[in-house]
Image (spheres, rainbow, N blue to C red):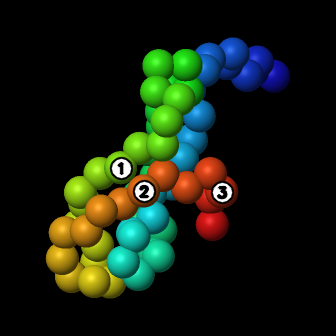
Amino acid sequence: MAKAKKTPRILIALLCSKCGAQNYLTEKNKTNTPDKLKFMKYCNWCKERTEHKESAKLK
């Protein structure tokens, strides 16, 4: 069996701030970036670029 990595990287979801849809999955290093991430990304449901915020829970 393979051992799990012991790194500070965690998997996060990015949610659209306008409609609340989970559009993107990404990783972040919680040691280097302890605050929540915000990106301007394209939302397929809104059909425009909106702010996407980090969510702690994956849907």
Find the distance from the CA under tag 1 to the CA under tag 2: 5 Å
Q: Residue at x 47, y 19 (%)?
A: 32
Judging depth in this view, the residue of 31 and 44 nearest the camera is 31
Mark 1 crowdedness (10 Å alpha carbons): few <14, some 14-19, many ≥20: some
| Dot 3 alpha-carbon crowd within 10 angstroms: few under 14, some 14 to 19, many 20 or more | few
Q: Confirm or deny contact between disc 3 and disc 2 (CB under 8 A).
A: no
**On the image, numbered disc 1 is attached to which residue?**
38
In the displayed structure, does residue 20 sit left or right of residue 5?
left
Could you tell me which secondary element the residue under label 2 belongs to?
Answer: strand
Residue carrying label 3? 57
Do residues under tags 1 and 2 come within 8 Å of each other at their CB atoms?
A: yes
Pointer 1 or 3: first along the chain? 1
Instruction: Name the quadrant of the C terminus.
Output: bottom right
Where residue 21 appears, x then y in whole percent?
Answer: 45, 75
The relative height of residue 56 versus residue 31 in the rendered view (above or below) is: below
* Amino acid type shown at disc 2: Lys
Residue under circle 2? 53
Mark 1: secondary structure: strand
